Image (cartoon, coloured by chain):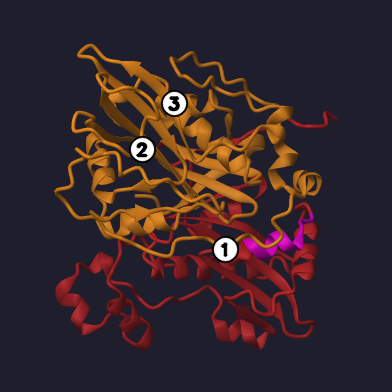
Amino acid sequence: MLLGGTISTPPASLRLKSTLNPQNAVTQSSQAAFPAAMQRKPPSYSISDEDLKSRGFLLRRTPEGLNLDQLNSVFVAVGFPRRDTAKIEVALEHTDALLWVEYEKTRRPVAFARATGDGVFNAIIWDVVVDPSFQSCGLGKAVMERLIEDLQAKGICNIALYSEPRVLGFYRPLGFVSDPDGIKGMVFIRKQRNKK
Amino acid sequence: MLLIPISSSSSVLPQSFFNSTSSYSSNHHSLFLSNLSYPIPYGSRKLKTLRLRANFWESIRSGFVKNNNSTQLVEPPSIVDEEEDTEPLLPVEFTLVERTLQDGLIEEIIFSSGGEIDVYDLQGLCDKVGWPRRPLVKLAAALKNSYMVATLHSVMKSSSVSDSGSGSSEGDSGEQQQEKKLIGMARATSDHAFNATIWDVLVDPEYQGQGLGKALVEKLVRALLQRDIGNISLFADSQVVDFYQNLGFEADPEGIKGMFWYPK
């Protein structure tokens, strides 16, 4: 499962060593220098990359090959508004990390999530979507676990998101807590131009 | 002394403020990061109607909240209303307050949304408000990676100087002493298209209670809106939720909750 606890920034060399030695949870050099809580184990996901691949799902971490019209269709399918693809392209260019799942058979995106932030302290995860035809088989979890891991690998400790009430139960088992210490997510509300 | 220029995505260059600050103390070195200009966003033409419909948060709007603070600001607090899109673009830098102090000094509070910020000054300000220390290199990187950094500076001038073309006057007489001090900051990260999140809003405790924090956030929000960012969000500690509510922010709109991953 996910790494427990909050990990403050271990040095890059430590992280590299961890991922190069998947068999050993911790490298020798790290034990002397850092307390156990800061050592990062290699990621162990609920569903492994191999598992996903064997089911025909390919993990992607860049926008290369991502068809924005098809992504838009997934957005619409889950109830998001359809967006201008030119704007989506701009948004993806200014994204700290993104992850999407390509279904090999159709070459279409079936799951997606991205994170924005300042690259050092904070990141917010947006647009977490799974095509309704592919929901409930672990794809959303797979995307979230890896996105969080990627953000952590950059040293970002503060990872947040805004969750619709009906999916709070999806984020909680992943380690998300709502309103910790009474911190409230707030959104600027503008007057509508056309009153309904 | 080297400083970090912060560019927003607009093509307005940050104004250099330092020709006129002859007495500004420069006994430390700051980190200098170059090449901070953002590319012109692709598709930067205004797609207002499309954007309003496409914005996820538009579906949860519930009307606007009037900004009803009363302050001694030179520029009256603006109410975000239907005319917002026809308002002139907010200048990158302008004076919020100008007042004469007891000893004849004139103090100007200057707002800037694209100006330069000295990380040492920022760290000093964070210390003053009691925030835990963060590594300077990371602070600098966070600022560089922010879409917009808004600052408040206090500039002290002696009133014996004639006020023709204040600020960056060329013929500096030896008597025109100016002291510039960072007294507030707020920054926003963004994907340059849909969402922006405001972080790190702080005002020097000596300058709190004057409506400067409200002005800082209000101007930052207006600048973001004028760049077509439709969704502006933030996370507020419980004791400042009311502060942001008075500025037009709504907590948990339609039950949407802010969540943090394994918060400390």
Q: Residue at x 42, y 45 (%)?
A: B15
User: Of the residues tagged 3 and 2, which is closer to the observer?
Assistant: 2
Chain coloured orange: which letter? B
Depth check, front residue: B22 or A78: B22
Q: What residue is shown with label 2?
A: B168
Q: Nearer the viewer, residue A4 or A58?
A: A58
**Which residue shows up at 19% across the image and 28% down it?**
B175
Report the chain shown in red. Answer: A
Left/right placement of residue A178 relative to residue B5 reads right
Label 3, secondary structure: give it: strand
CA gap, disc 3 and disc 2: 17 Å
Query: Residue B16: image x %, image y %?
Result: 38, 46
How far from the left and from the top, in percent, is residue A92?
62, 65
The residue under the point 36% across, 38% down is: B168
In this rendered view, identify the residue nearer to me: B128 or B183. B183
Marks 1 and 2, how far apart at CA: 29 Å
User: Where residue B39 is drawn, which disc sits there?
Assistant: 1
Q: Chain of mark 3?
A: B
Real-space CA distance between mark 3 and mark 1, rounded to the nearest whole angstrom: 30 Å
Residue reaching furthest front? B171
| Residue A10 place in picture, x, y as percent | 28, 69
Q: Tag 3: Cα neighbours inside 10 Å, few (<14), some, or many (≥20)?
A: many
**What range of the chain is rendered magenta?**
A82-90
> Residue B257: x, y in percent?
57, 42
